Image (cartoon, rainbow, N blue to C red):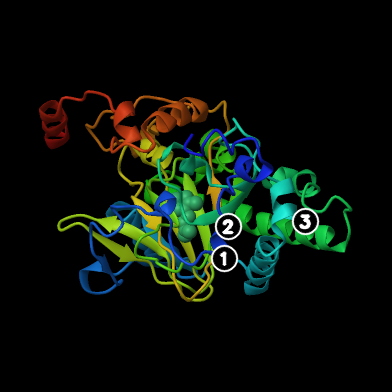
Amino acid sequence: MQSSSSSASTPAAASGLVFDLGSAAGVPETHAWPGVNEYPSVESAGRDVVPVVDMGVACPDATRALARAADEWGVFLLVGHGVPREVAARAEEQVARLFVLPAPDKARAGRRPGEPTATGYGRPPLALRFSKLMWSEGYTFRAATVREEFRRVWPDGGDDYLRFCDVMEEYDREMRALGGRLLDLFFMALGLTDVQFATGETERRIRETWTATMHPILCPEPERAIGLTAHTDSGFITLIMQSPVPGLQLLRRGPDRWVTVPAPPGALIVMLGDLFQVLTNGRFRSPIHRAVVSRERERISVPYFLCPPEDMTVAPLASALLPGRKAVFRAVTWPEYMEVKHKVFGTDAPALEMLQLQVDEEEQGERAATT
Ligand SMILES: O=C(O)CCC(=O)C(=O)O
Ligand SMILES: [Fe+2]
C-alpha cells in the first residue's frame, strides 16, 4: 500500500494515521488529488434535483417514486422512514464522541495491517489502493461485534463504553428494520408478489449487515483534497445518516458534473450498490459518488451497509428479468466480488464490467420486441 514501509511499523501508520489531519495548516502532496476539480460541482436544482422518496405515503405512490429514483439515479433522499429522530441523534452524538477521543485511544482500535476490510479505526478500506491519501478518518465495525470491538477503545468497559454500545445497538435495530421495509418496497417495485417476497430466501438473507462510520475532518484547502474518492458501493444497499452538512456528491454524465446531495435534517440517503445492480439485472444502478471536505463545517456520515452474507451467490433475480431479456451478469459471491473490486480500485475500470456476460444485444432486442 501507499504508506511508506519506514512508517508502516508504527501503530499510527498501521491504523492509517500517517498524518495529523486535524492540525494541518495546508494540504501536503501526499493528500493532494490532481483530478478533484476535473468536473464542476453543482447544486441539487433544475434537472439535477436529487430525488426524494417518502415512505410514509400510500404504497403505489411510494413504490413508483422509489422505482423511478432507483432507475434514474440509483440514490435518493429518504423521508417518512420511521427511524425516530432521537435514535439517529443519539447515534450521531456517540459517533462524534468517538472521533474526538485522543489519538492514542483511537490508534488502540486501529485496523490490523494486511486486513484491508477488517474492522477498526483508520483509513476506509477502499483507500488502500490509491497513491494519494484521503482527508478522512473512519471506524468500520459490525453491529454484532460492537461490544468486543469497542473494548479496544475503552478497555475499562466503563460508562462511556456501555453508553456507546447501547446506542449503536439501538441504531442497528432501527436500521435493520428499515432495511427490511425498504427491501419490501424494492421487491414490489420489481414486481414480486407478496407471497414471493414474504417467503423469499433472498430477502431473508440480504438483511445481514455491517456498519461503518466515517468522518471527513475540516480541511484548510478543500479544493485540493478529497474525503472519499469516487467509487461505487459494492453491496446491496447503503443507508447513510449524515450531519446537516452536505458533502456527498453524485457523478452525473453529459456533461459530466458532481451533484451535491442536500442534507435536510432527518432525511437518510439510500445508495444502491453494485450487487444490487446485479440482483436487478442492471435495472437499478449503483451510482458513482464521492465525499468532499470543507474548510468550515465538520461533517459526520454514518453509512450502514446492507451486504450479502459471504456464502450467498448473487445473481439476477428471475423476477427482475424483463420479458425476453437474459441475465447480463454472472453469479458471484461477496468474497469473489471483493477480489475483483480490489484489483480495479485505483484504476478507471468499473469492477461490474468484469461480471458482465456477453449477451447479444440484437437478440435481446428482438426477443423483447416479440414478447
Ligand atoms: O460520506 C458519505 O456520505 C459517503 C460515504 C461513502 O460513500 C462510503 O462510505 O462508501
Ligand atoms: Fe460509498
Which residue is drawn at the image coordinates 50% and 68% (left, top)?
A: 218
Q: In the rendered view, would you say 308 is above or below 121?
A: above
> Label 1 sits on what residue type?
Ser
Q: Mark 2 points at which residue?
A: 20
Determine which quarter of the picture holds residue 205.
Answer: top right
* SS state under label 2: loop
Q: How far apart are marks 1 and 3 (CA)?
A: 29 Å
Q: Distance between the residues labelled 1 and 2?
A: 6 Å
Q: Name the residue under label 3.
A: 165
Q: Nearer the viewer, mark 3 or mark 2?
A: 2
Q: 150 or 216, which lies in front?
A: 216
* Residue 308 percent location from the top left of the image: 53, 36
* 65 displayed left or right of 333: left
Count how many numbered circles sit on residues in the image. Answer: 3
Which residue lies at the image location 39% right of the left edge and 58% below the top edge?
225
The residue drawn where x is 55% and y is 43% is: 198
Check disc 1 and report the residue beneath it: 23
Amino acid type, callout 3: Cys
Quick one: 347 or 32, which is closer to the camera? Answer: 32
Q: Can residue 185 be seen in this view?
A: no
